[in-house]
Structure formats: structure tokens, C-alpha cells
Amino acid sequence: MISKDVENRIVKYLSQSADIQDLNFLNEWLKKKENQSIFKEYVKTQFAINLTMNDPGLDKIKDELLREIRKDKKPVIKMRVVWVLKYAAIAILFMGLGFIISKNKYDKDKLIKPREDAITLQLENGEIEVITEKGNHQLIDDNGEVIGNQKGKELVYEVNEYDSELKYNTLTIPKGKRFGVVLSDGTKVQLNAGSSITYPISFNPNGPRKVVLSGEAYFEVSHDQKRQFIVNTQELDVKVYGTRFNITNYPEDENTEVVLIEGSVALSQQGETLKKEKEVFLKPGHMGAYNKRDKNIVDQKVNTSLYTSWMAGNLVFRNETFENITRKLERHYNVVIINNNKDLADETFNATIELNHETIEQVFNYFNKIYRIEYQIVENKIIIN
């Protein structure tokens, strides 16, 4: 048996009336296997009832449902809150059979051909090494000394003796890939698609630990009360001692966003790190957004899981504009999206996309079927009309 509250949320989901709170609740509730079985039974029942009561044909039902869905000025996309929710899409929209077939039988001419860019590591002497994600090898400095090892999708630096001069490496992750690095002080950094980080091979034992980030990364900073850890994002400095947080700092974005999961961080404009009155301190569960245009920092409470879901291979959008959604899709799928529909750019959507299970073709096929978004595919480009 389940509570009335849970049952009401399931019914709201199946009737396309669930709000963000309902979706987040179901997302957590469905992580338990026994709850997934219960949910499937509700979906099967809903599907059977609708199918038997509406026998004119699936095409007619589908058209009627699409008209109803489009009446909502703020459309909501439900692309798998978790894996089991794909059954709900089949039940409600009566598109299951066609969608499953289309996933496996795309016209070869309409398949997107993403670029295959490599992960690179620029060494202190300027040499560039190509990093293969399945590789395992040692990292060697100019003197032939081992400074670390690659272990699959992660570089792990060893604690090396500081030699009075900081020597830097730069790790660059192309669009469509994710990669991690463990710095010599034990700090763990997970880099998102289209990001790069510059860091010293070995930190100064008597000074602050500084790294430079472009793009997005999740940090688990090794605690060191004597040495601050500073992340520089061109215009903003993020100062910590030991904590977990996510930074988004893509050049094309209007804001640099710092989401604090645990601990404490202080934000300040570059060059004002030492001015206490200029710092903005964040509490866990809060985001500091630095606007690059007006130079202001706004502190607000947020659902941190929305900003860290990318590490589990998911893209989660809540009241996100279509323009921002396409920008993130470009990074994660390494494709080019050209939107010629200017009215569509400001429309807001809710969606959860599983990057490891859903191709960019499936994502846009869904947009086309539900919202009649017309598009063409030319090599690795998606052109929206």
C-alpha cells in the first residue's frame, strides 16, 4: 500500500498536471525498486483504461492529446524522471510503439555525426598529450620524474616535493565528454563538457592553492586550514578551505554560478580577494550568481541536485528557456544547434535527459512529436525552422 499523498502525485503525473515539486518527489521515491513496481502497475492500468475507452485509433487519440498539451502556455517535458518513467510517456501519449521503433530505425541520412574531439593535457613545457579515456599510463615531468598516473577517466597527481617554482598543467575537456582530476593536495575535480582547468603540479606549502577554471566543474576540496583554496574564473575568485561545490563559468553564459553543497565559500571579484567587506559568503544549499555585465553577486537558496546532476550523466532543466537548453545540448552532445525560430528561444521547459541512454536524435524527435518543432539535420548540425 502507498499513502494518499504518493497516489495523488502519481495521478497528477499521469494526467500531465504534476508540478516541479511533484516531479522532484517522484524522482526520489522511485529510486527504491519496490516503488518502481508499484508505479508500473499504475501506468499499465492507465494505459489499459485509455486504450479500451478510445477505440477510434491511436492516430486520432494522439492528435487530440497533442492539442490539449499545447494549450498550456508553459509546456512541460517529462523525459524520464528516472528510468522507469519512460513507461509513463508510453501510457499517456500513446506514442510508445512508434517511438521505440524510431529509436532504432532512423534514416541514415538523418543521423547526427558529432565531432570526435580529444581530451588534452598541456604540460609545463608546452607539449600537449592526448588523453584516451580508457588509458592507464604515468605522467612524467621534464626531469623524467613521475608526477602522477592516469586511471581511466581520471588523472591522479602524486604529492611531490615543491621545488620553489610553480609548474602548471592544463587539462582540457572537449564538448561531449567528462573527465576528472585529483590534484597533488588530494582535491578532487570533476570537469564537465567544454571545460578546462589550469593547476600547479605541486602546490606551494606556504601559500594559497590556486587554480583557474573555464567551463563547469565540481570540486571536493581537501581540507587545509593553513592554505586557502582559490578557484579563479577570470572575473570571480572563489575562496574555500575545504568543501564541496559546483562552479559554472562558460564564456558564453551571462552569469558565473557557484552552488555550495557542503562547507563554506566566499565569492569576490578578482583583485578584491583580500577585502573582507567585498566578499559574499554562501551557506550550504545556496547559489551565488555573479552577473558578468553588472558585476553584482546574488545569493539565493536552490535545489543543489539540479546543478550537480550532470555528474551522474543527466541534464535537468526546470523553467529553463529553450535557448539555454539548446546551448547545454550543444556542449554535452558536441553538435551545433541553429535556432531560426526566435519566438521559441524564450519559451520555458522542464525536462530530464539521460545523456548515457538518450541520443540527440531521440531528444529532438521528442520535441518534434510533442511540440511540432521542425528541424533538419546536416552532418553534426541541427537547424530549427
Image: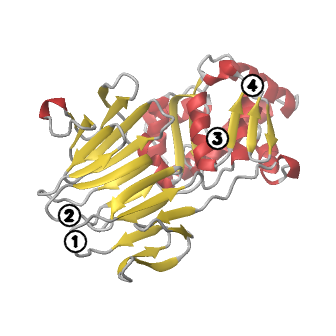
- The residue mark sitting in front, 1 or 3, is 1
Along the polypeptide, which appears first: circle 1 or circle 2? 1
Q: Can see residue 16?
A: yes
- Estimate how packed mark 1 is, as few (under 14), some (14 to 19) or many (20 or more) residues with alpha carbons within 10 Å: few
Confirm or deny contact between disc 1 and disc 3 (CB under 8 A): no
Residue bearing the label numbered 3: 88
- Contact, mark 4 vs mark 2 (Cβ under 8 Å): no
Task: State the image coordinates of residue 34 (x, y, percent, origin top left).
Answer: 49, 55
Left or right of residue 171, residue 219 in this image: left
- The residue identified by callout 2 is 204
Marks 1/3: CA–CA distance: 57 Å
Amino acid type of the residue tagged 2 in the rendering: Asn
Q: Label 2 crowding class (10 Å Cα cut-off): few <14, some 14-19, many 20+?
A: some
Residue 166 in picture, x, y percent from top left = 28, 64
How far apart in space, not on screen, are marks 1 and 2 (Cα)? 6 Å
- Amino acid tagged 4: Leu
Query: Residue at 76% across / 49% down in the picture?
Result: 112
- At x 71%, y 52%, the residue is 114
| Residue carrying label 1 | 162
Gap in Å between the C-alphas at discs 3 and 2? 55 Å
Q: Residue at x 32, y 45 (%)?
A: 232
Q: Say which element carries label 4.
A: helix
Looking at marks 1 and 3 on the same chain, the residue that comes earlier in the sequence is marked by 3
